[in-house]
Image: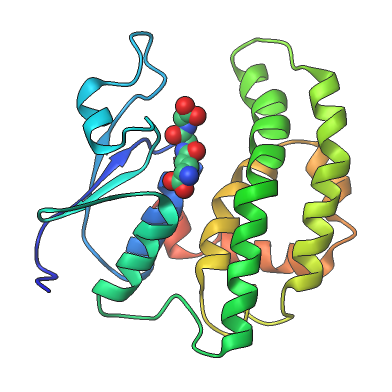
Amino acid sequence: MPTTEVVNLYGAAWSVYVRIVRLALEEKKVKYGLVEVDVFAETGVPQEHLTRHPFGRIPAFEHGEFELYETGAIVRYIDDAFPGCKLQPTDPRARAKVNQIVGILDSYAYRTLVWDVYVERVVLAREGRLADERKIAAALPRAAVCLSELNRLSDDREFLIGGDVTFADLYAAPMFACFMQAPEAVSLMEQHEKFVSWWKRFAVRDSMSRTIP
Ligand SMILES: N[C@@H](CCC(=O)N[C@@H](CS)C(=O)NCC(=O)O)C(=O)O
């Protein structure tokens, strides 16, 4: 497979899922171009983007002629197709735990931490709009379960699972980069020492600095 073919990522720098893919590319040291797509444009999702991603989401990815969408498929392809560090452990139990954490982040944490807390509390305030306090209040107990499970499942080592960076870190970090800006995060996080230590280490990683929205 020609790894020298051009890699393009279609999306927006603010997007959590785009950042997950960018982190994978950065960690694997793959050169890529980020092509801005505004899926929230007043005129709707741009028509040419719907040919790449019929569901109108970001990111979409291409490597030469090869096209993909869905973050899980994209990061697995990047890990398999390019040389460099491996982003998935080979040990079956460690690999299963990475997949479990990714599943939790995808299915439960993203909507709760990013949309229901960060967007309501931080983004709307930035835009001078009022937060939906009921939505935030309803999200906090769900956020507490996410944090307690992520803390329980994570190892007390350099990364969430084991001594090497994995998809678990790459999925969690962009979500926590948002969530940690909400004042509510402070009290929720303080009970989860292992997870807080991980965040402090991972937040200052080079790949994180190079992908700041
Ligand atoms: N299942 C998709 C989810 C991607 C996703 O939800 N992306 C958000 C941005 S972070 C998006 O495109 N939102 C636009 C919308 O909801 O209309 C994936 O894994 O790639």
Residue 43 figure quarter: top left
Residue 12 placed where, x, y %?
Answer: 37, 35
Q: Is residue 96 left or right of residue 153?
A: left
Q: 91 and 131: which one is in front? A: 91
User: Looking at the picture, does residue 102 appear above or below residue 98?
Assistant: above
Residue 73 figure quarter: bottom left
| Residue 15 visible here | no
Residue 37 figure quarter: top left
Q: At x 56% / y 80%, what residue is drawn? A: 95
User: Looking at the picture, does residue 8 appear above or below residue 37?
Assistant: below
Residue 168 placed where, x, y %?
Answer: 57, 66
Tell how many labels: 0
Q: Is residue 171 left or right of residue 58?
A: right
User: Looking at the picture, does residue 114 appear above or below residue 8?
Assistant: above
Q: At x 88% / y 47%, what residue is drawn? A: 187
Q: At x 86% / y 31%, what residue is drawn? A: 138
Q: Is residue 167 left or right of residue 133?
A: left
| Residue 48 visible here | yes
